[in-house]
Image (cartoon, grey):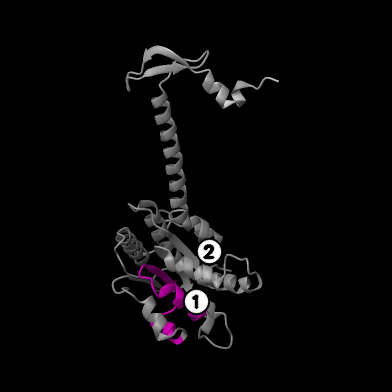
């Protein structure tokens, strides 16, 4: 039985014929296959090497993106799905305070574009004013405009704690304490959203549980680029968290505190 030439590379090589043409690039004698135009062996080798290099480059770019700019979309944890669409462009600044805070958040985003800018940011004040919206807007601006790709991550603290507790029953869950502390601890820029809410739902005490504080400490201990949103003031935070944890939260926040008061209307209020 005759073996097809297309499935037999050795037979294909045996059919290579010399020609009297010379490669203008390498000055070497060109060859050809039956019914095919002449070609230079060195040119072909170079083309194969270039294709292989491009394949490797694309693979490296893919994994680099997965570890950096794709983190925001893939690994963020929201408790409000509508918040995912928040940007600086669609922030509704109702009143002068909201406008000033919008401008302040944009300036902070610009500072975070520099990889060596190490400071935390605190959004505090009344609920429903836009703290989470502006915090996510900073992340998106940094994620899209840094010179070198960075990993940005938005996480609802209350939802994070719920997922970690759920993982106790599912060992193969990606939301184990170890995985989450590692992921959040190594993100280049992190938002911890609605800090304190995980304690405000408890009836017996406002103090955060030891478990919650240990998880947050593990995340914040080696971080210096974290954005925190909370409805609580400094006295209320001191009543919930221990001083060592608070010191990690407050790294470099002087000059990077954005506060919403009653001057800004509650955007989520409903009249009935």
User: Which numbered tag is attached to residue 215?
Assistant: 1
> At 42% from the left edge and 34% from the top edge, which residue is drawn?
49
Front one among 152 and 239: 152
Crowding at dot 1, Cα within 10 Å, few <14 / some 14-19 / many 20+, comes out as some
Q: Quadrant of the C terminus?
A: bottom right
- Which residue is at 52% across, 14% downward? 34
Q: Which residue is mark 2?
A: 77
Q: Is residue 237 magenta?
A: yes
Disc 1/disc 2 C-alpha distance (Å):
16 Å
What residue appears at the point 39 percent right and 76 percent down from the top-left corner? 249
Q: Nearer the viewer, residue 72 or 214?
A: 214
- Label 1 vs 2, first from the N-terminus: 2
Q: Secondary structure at mark 1?
A: helix
Q: Nearer the viewer, residue 102 or 108?
A: 108
Horizontal arrangement in the rendering, residue 133 relative to residue 111 (left or right): right
For residue 118, the mark is none
Which range is magenta?
A: 212-239
**Residue 108 lies within the magenta run:** no
């Amino acid at each position: 039985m005759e073996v097809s030439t297309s499935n037999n590379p050795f037979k294909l090589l045996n059919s290579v014929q010399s020609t009297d043409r010379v490669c203008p690039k390498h000055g070497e004698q060109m060859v050809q296959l039956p019914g095919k135009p002449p070609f230079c062996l060195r040119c072909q080798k170079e083309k194969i090497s270039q294709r292989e290099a491009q394949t490797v480059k694309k693979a490296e770019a893919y994994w680099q993106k997965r570890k950096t700019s794709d983190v925001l979309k893939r690994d963020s944890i929201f408790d409000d799905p509508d918040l995912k669409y928040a940007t600086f462009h669609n922030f509704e600044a109702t009143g002068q305070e909201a406008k000033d805070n919008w401008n302040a958040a944009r300036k902070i985003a610009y500072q975070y574009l520099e990889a060596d800018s190490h400071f935390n940011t605190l959004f505090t004040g009344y609920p429903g004013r836009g703290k989470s919206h502006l915090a996510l807007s900073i992340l998106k601006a940094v994620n899209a405009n840094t010179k070198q790709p960075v990993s940005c991550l938005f996480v609802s603290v209350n939802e994070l704690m719920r997922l970690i507790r759920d993982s106790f029953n599912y060992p193969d869950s990606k939301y184990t304490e170890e995985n989450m502390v590692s992921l959040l601890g190594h993100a280049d820029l992190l938002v911890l959203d609605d800090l304190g809410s995980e304690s405000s739902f408890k009836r017996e005490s406002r103090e955060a549980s030891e478990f919650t504080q240990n998880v947050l400490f593990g995340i914040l201990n080696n971080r210096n680029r974290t954005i925190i949103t909370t409805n609580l003031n400094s006295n209320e935070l001191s009543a919930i968290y221990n001083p060592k944890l608070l010191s990690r939260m407050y790294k470099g926040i002087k000059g990077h505190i954005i506060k919403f008061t009653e001057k800004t209307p509650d955007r989520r209020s409903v009249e009935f």
